Image: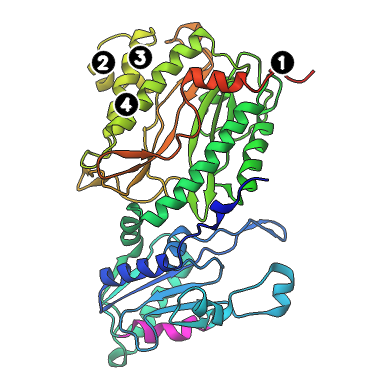
Amino acid sequence: MRDQTHLQHADPPDEPARRRRALAEVIGADGIAILAATPERKRNNDVDYPYRPDSDFRYVTGFPEPEAIAVIAPGFAEGEYLLFCRERDPDAEIWVGKRAGLDGAVADYGADRAIAVGEFDAWLGRLLDGRERLYLSLGTHPSFERRVLEGVERLKSQGRRGRPPAQIVALDRVLHEMRLRKSEAEIALMREAARTSARAHVAAMQAVAPGVREYQLAAVLHYEFELDGMTWAYPSIVGSGANACVLHYIENADAIADGALVLIDAGAEYRGYAGDITRTFPANGRFSEAQRALYEVVLAANGAAIAAARPGVPANAPHAAALEVLVDGLIELGLLEGSRDAIKDDERYRAFFMHGTSHWLGMDVHDVGDYKIDGEWRLLESGMALTVEPGLYVPPGSEQAPARFHGTGIRIEDDIVITEDGCEVLTADVPKDADAIEALMAATGDRRGPA
């Protein structure tokens, strides 16, 4: 039985309260912020998708239920944090489980006052009246945003009896800047997501053999995630052979051929925080000479990017470092001709490396936050979390590449958090050195595949 003690390290209950205090300082005594939970989504007929709260809403409230609206109103006499939510309903709870209800919203989720969600429109005018600025997410939940804006118009129509906000400010921009810098509690959750994600990748390396189907490796990944009480953070990518050249390949349908490389891009989500790992390994446990040659280039690029990630450097510094290594490798292996600078300037490398090296990571796998400020790359800061994922992809029939590389896709991705003097690699538990991968796979025995 796996040790489950790490699952007790939930997001501390004071974290959402700390975030609300920080948000209240930003919006000021004459501002108000209103945000709604994501609606439930129908999958088919009377079946809904499993519910996951909107990341911004969860960040501010910690509240896990749909049909909820949070209001941050500094100085409001009846509560500076109001949570409109569903009331308890014994009949409904027989079918779909217990609700927090109004009492639970206060006792368990820190609301100053909880109000039945059906009363929101009746309260809206009182909440808006006399506020100078309304902070509202724009483009996230259009029907709810229209509903709030209609409340503003109703208040305008009252003439001298009501004074609506004079300014509407994008709340998502404010929250996304806050979310970009992770607290120690958030980083602890991301370590857990990374730890389980790494364990799942190791299990997949141990389970692979020629003839195994891609979806069977996906099942290994998801088993490991769920064994730790987690779920996938995004649809898992298991691409073998030429399928690894499709960046977001999620069909996961083919049988894995002897001699093929397998690219897995998969991560677990823990308490709302995503892991995101990619590893590439040989189905039969041994890299061919051509595969290893390309792999070593990508591995060196991964290492260069991680070494470049530190506070005070531009956010694109990891990409710039990785790109130089990749271009040099492409020249050395005969996939490109010319000087490094010329190839970078005319972007010929994009035939084999067509994506960025990093993206923000957090509650969303492609997490929020601007990469540039006033047109310039922002500087990395302690607490920012990002991926490092260089790759090389040589599709079948490539006219530029020697035939020995055709149908080969390689990506190596790690999760890092910027520290005071460098970065912490959260995903070091899964091997990426070619010799280490081969040793791990050799230790698991016969790889002849199904009879």
Q: Work out whether 155 lies above or below 443.
A: below
Inspect the image, locate mark 4, and give the three-letter code of the amino acid beneath it.
Answer: Ala
Dot 1 and dot 4 residues touching (CB under 8 Å): no
Residue at label 3?
329
Inspect the image, locate mark 3, and give the three-letter code of the amino acid beneath it.
Answer: Gly
C-alpha distance separating marks 1 and 2 = 42 Å
Give the crowd class for mark 4: few <14, some 14-19, many >=20 residues within 10 Å. many
Badge 2 element = helix
Give the dominant element type of the magenta stretch: helix, strand or loop: helix
Q: Nearer the viewer, residue 104 or 397?
A: 104
Dot 3 and dot 2 residues touching (CB under 8 Å): no
Tag nearer the camera, 3 or 1: 1
Q: Work out whether 94 lies above or below 56.
A: below
Please state the horizontal and vertical placement of residue 69, each as a whole percent of the image.
47, 73
Please state the horizontal and vertical placement of residue 87, each as a whole percent of the image.
60, 80
Q: Is-magenta flag for residue 376?
A: no
Tag nearer the camera, 4 or 3: 4
Q: Work out whether 4 lies above or below 287.
A: below
Residue at label 1?
448
Looking at the rendered image, the quarter that the N terminus falls into is: top right
Residue range of the region highlighted in magenta in the rendering = 119-129
Q: Is-magenta flag for residue 121?
A: yes
